[in-house]
Protein backbone atom coordinates (compact mmCIF):
# COMPACT_ATOMS: atom_id res chain seq x y z
CA UNK A 1 0.00 0.00 0.00
CA UNK A 2 1.44 3.39 -0.97
CA UNK A 3 1.86 6.30 1.42
CA UNK A 4 -1.00 8.12 -0.29
CA UNK A 5 -3.32 5.18 0.29
CA UNK A 6 -2.31 5.04 3.94
CA UNK A 7 -2.80 8.79 4.18
CA UNK A 8 -6.26 8.38 2.68
CA UNK A 9 -7.17 5.90 5.39
CA UNK A 10 -5.73 8.10 8.15
CA UNK A 11 -7.71 11.16 7.04
CA UNK A 12 -10.88 9.19 6.23
CA UNK A 13 -11.04 7.35 9.55
CA UNK A 14 -10.10 10.50 11.49
CA UNK A 15 -12.78 12.45 9.68
CA UNK A 16 -15.51 9.92 10.39
CA UNK A 17 -14.54 9.53 14.05
CA UNK A 18 -13.97 13.20 14.96
CA UNK A 19 -16.78 14.70 12.88
CA UNK A 20 -19.06 11.85 13.94
CA UNK A 21 -18.32 12.55 17.59
CA UNK A 22 -18.95 16.27 17.15
CA UNK A 23 -22.16 16.01 15.15
CA UNK A 24 -23.56 13.27 17.41
CA UNK A 25 -22.94 15.47 20.43
CA UNK A 26 -24.50 18.51 18.73
CA UNK A 27 -27.54 16.61 17.40
CA UNK A 28 -28.25 15.14 20.83
CA UNK A 29 -27.99 18.60 22.38
CA UNK A 30 -30.13 20.16 19.63
CA UNK A 31 -32.85 17.57 20.29
CA UNK A 32 -33.22 18.68 23.90
CA UNK A 33 -32.26 22.37 23.77
CA UNK A 34 -33.35 25.24 21.52
CA UNK A 35 -30.58 25.86 19.00
CA UNK A 36 -30.19 29.53 19.93
CA UNK A 37 -29.30 28.44 23.49
CA UNK A 38 -26.57 25.96 22.43
CA UNK A 39 -23.00 27.11 22.95
CA UNK A 40 -21.38 25.32 20.02
CA UNK A 41 -18.51 27.66 19.12
CA UNK A 42 -15.99 26.23 21.58
CA UNK A 43 -16.85 22.64 20.71
CA UNK A 44 -16.59 23.45 16.99
CA UNK A 45 -13.10 24.88 17.52
CA UNK A 46 -12.12 21.83 19.59
CA UNK A 47 -13.38 19.54 16.82
CA UNK A 48 -11.24 21.30 14.21
CA UNK A 49 -8.12 21.27 16.42
CA UNK A 50 -8.60 17.61 17.41
CA UNK A 51 -9.14 16.59 13.78
CA UNK A 52 -5.99 18.39 12.64
CA UNK A 53 -4.00 16.96 15.57
CA UNK A 54 -5.13 13.39 14.89
CA UNK A 55 -4.34 13.69 11.18
CA UNK A 56 -0.90 15.21 11.83
CA UNK A 57 -0.09 12.58 14.48
CA UNK A 58 -1.26 9.83 12.13
CA UNK A 59 0.95 11.11 9.32
CA UNK A 60 3.95 11.43 11.64
CA UNK A 61 3.42 7.86 12.82
CA UNK A 62 3.08 6.77 9.19
CA UNK A 63 6.36 8.46 8.29
CA UNK A 64 8.17 6.84 11.22
CA UNK A 65 6.78 3.36 10.61
CA UNK A 66 7.20 3.26 6.82
CA UNK A 67 10.43 4.52 5.38
CA UNK A 68 9.61 4.04 1.70
CA UNK A 69 6.60 3.21 -0.40
CA UNK A 70 5.87 2.50 -4.02
CA UNK A 71 5.34 5.53 -6.25
CA UNK A 72 2.11 6.66 -7.81
CA UNK A 73 0.88 5.02 -10.95
CA UNK A 74 -1.75 6.07 -13.49
CA UNK A 75 -4.57 4.40 -11.57
CA UNK A 76 -3.64 6.33 -8.42
CA UNK A 77 -3.78 9.59 -10.34
CA UNK A 78 -7.14 8.69 -11.94
CA UNK A 79 -8.73 7.66 -8.66
CA UNK A 80 -7.39 10.77 -6.92
CA UNK A 81 -8.61 13.06 -9.70
CA UNK A 82 -12.08 11.48 -9.76
CA UNK A 83 -12.37 11.58 -5.95
CA UNK A 84 -11.42 15.25 -5.88
CA UNK A 85 -13.85 15.96 -8.73
CA UNK A 86 -16.86 14.44 -6.97
CA UNK A 87 -15.83 15.73 -3.54
CA UNK A 88 -15.63 19.22 -5.02
CA UNK A 89 -19.23 18.99 -6.18
CA UNK A 90 -20.36 17.91 -2.72
CA UNK A 91 -18.46 20.80 -1.13
CA UNK A 92 -19.74 23.25 -3.77
CA UNK A 93 -23.32 22.17 -3.10
CA UNK A 94 -22.74 22.80 0.59
CA UNK A 95 -21.37 26.27 -0.06
CA UNK A 96 -24.38 27.05 -2.24
CA UNK A 97 -26.62 25.88 0.61
CA UNK A 98 -24.61 28.09 2.97
CA UNK A 99 -25.16 31.17 0.78
CA UNK A 100 -28.88 30.44 0.45
CA UNK A 101 -29.21 29.97 4.19
CA UNK A 102 -27.38 33.26 4.82
CA UNK A 103 -29.65 35.06 2.32
CA UNK A 104 -32.71 33.63 4.09
CA UNK A 105 -31.25 34.72 7.46
CA UNK A 106 -31.38 31.23 8.97
CA UNK A 107 -30.10 30.94 12.55
CA UNK A 108 -26.30 31.08 12.90
CA UNK A 109 -26.25 27.63 14.48
CA UNK A 110 -27.34 25.96 11.23
CA UNK A 111 -25.14 28.14 9.05
CA UNK A 112 -22.12 27.33 11.20
CA UNK A 113 -22.70 23.59 10.75
CA UNK A 114 -23.29 23.51 7.00
CA UNK A 115 -19.65 24.25 6.16
CA UNK A 116 -17.94 21.56 8.27
CA UNK A 117 -20.76 19.13 7.49
CA UNK A 118 -20.38 19.54 3.75
CA UNK A 119 -16.61 19.62 3.96
CA UNK A 120 -16.73 16.38 5.94
CA UNK A 121 -19.20 14.80 3.52
CA UNK A 122 -17.07 15.82 0.54
CA UNK A 123 -13.89 14.45 2.09
CA UNK A 124 -15.58 11.21 3.15
CA UNK A 125 -16.86 10.78 -0.40
CA UNK A 126 -13.39 11.56 -1.77
CA UNK A 127 -11.77 9.04 0.58
CA UNK A 128 -14.45 6.45 -0.13
CA UNK A 129 -13.70 6.73 -3.83
CA UNK A 130 -9.96 6.52 -3.20
CA UNK A 131 -10.47 3.44 -1.02
CA UNK A 132 -12.53 1.95 -3.84
CA UNK A 133 -9.57 2.57 -6.13
CA UNK A 134 -7.35 0.69 -3.68
CA UNK A 135 -9.79 -2.21 -3.68
CA UNK A 136 -9.87 -2.19 -7.46
CA UNK A 137 -6.09 -2.28 -7.58
CA UNK A 138 -6.09 -5.31 -5.30
CA UNK A 139 -8.69 -6.91 -7.54
CA UNK A 140 -7.10 -5.51 -10.71
CA UNK A 141 -6.51 -8.92 -12.19
CA UNK A 142 -10.29 -9.22 -12.50
CA UNK A 143 -10.22 -6.19 -14.80
CA UNK A 144 -7.38 -7.63 -16.86
CA UNK A 145 -9.39 -10.82 -17.30
CA UNK A 146 -12.52 -8.84 -18.17
CA UNK A 147 -14.40 -10.22 -15.16
CA UNK A 148 -16.72 -8.16 -13.01
CA UNK A 149 -16.79 -8.09 -9.23
CA UNK A 150 -19.22 -6.64 -6.78
CA UNK A 151 -17.24 -3.39 -7.16
CA UNK A 152 -17.39 -3.44 -10.96
CA UNK A 153 -14.48 -3.92 -13.28
CA UNK A 154 -11.43 -1.69 -13.22
CA UNK A 155 -12.24 -0.65 -16.76
CA UNK A 156 -15.61 0.72 -15.62
CA UNK A 157 -14.07 3.63 -13.72
CA UNK A 158 -14.89 6.98 -15.33
CA UNK A 159 -12.01 8.61 -17.15
CA UNK A 160 -11.67 12.26 -16.11
Image (tube, rainbow, N blue to C red):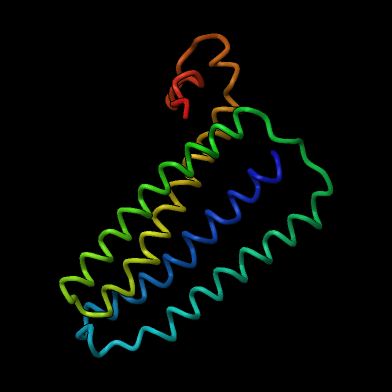
Residue farthest along the top direction in this orientation? 145
| In this picture, residue 77 sits left or right of residue 1 | left
From this view, report whether residue 37 is shown above or below residue 157. Answer: below
Indicate the quadrant where residue 20 lies: bottom left
Residue farthest along the right direction in this orientation? 67
| In this picture, residue 93 sits left or right of residue 156 | left
| In this picture, residue 27 sits left or right of residue 139 | left
From this view, report whether residue 5 is shown above or below residue 135. Answer: below
From this view, report whether residue 19 is shown above or below residue 88. Answer: below
- Residue at position x 67%, y 30% from top? 73
Q: Nearer the viewer, residue 64 or 84?
A: 84
- Residue at position x 45%, y 16% from top? 148
Residue farthest along the left direction in this orientation? 104
Q: Quadrant of the N terminus?
A: top right
Percent across and percent down for residue 95 are 32, 60
Indicate the quadrant where residue 156 lies: top left
- Residue at position x 64%, y 51% from top? 7
Percent across and percent down for residue 30 are 25, 79
Percent across and percent down for residue 60 are 74, 62
- Residue at position x 41%, y 72% from top? 22
Question: What is the tally of numbered marks visible in this picture?
Answer: 0
| In this picture, residue 25 sits left or right of residue 102 | right
From this view, report whether residue 74 is shown above or below residue 99. Answer: above
Amino acid sequence: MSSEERSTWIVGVSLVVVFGWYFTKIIIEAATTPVDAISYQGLLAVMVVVFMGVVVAGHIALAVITRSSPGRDERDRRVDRFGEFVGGYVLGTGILALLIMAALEVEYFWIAHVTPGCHGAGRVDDHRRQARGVQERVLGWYGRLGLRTRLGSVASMPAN
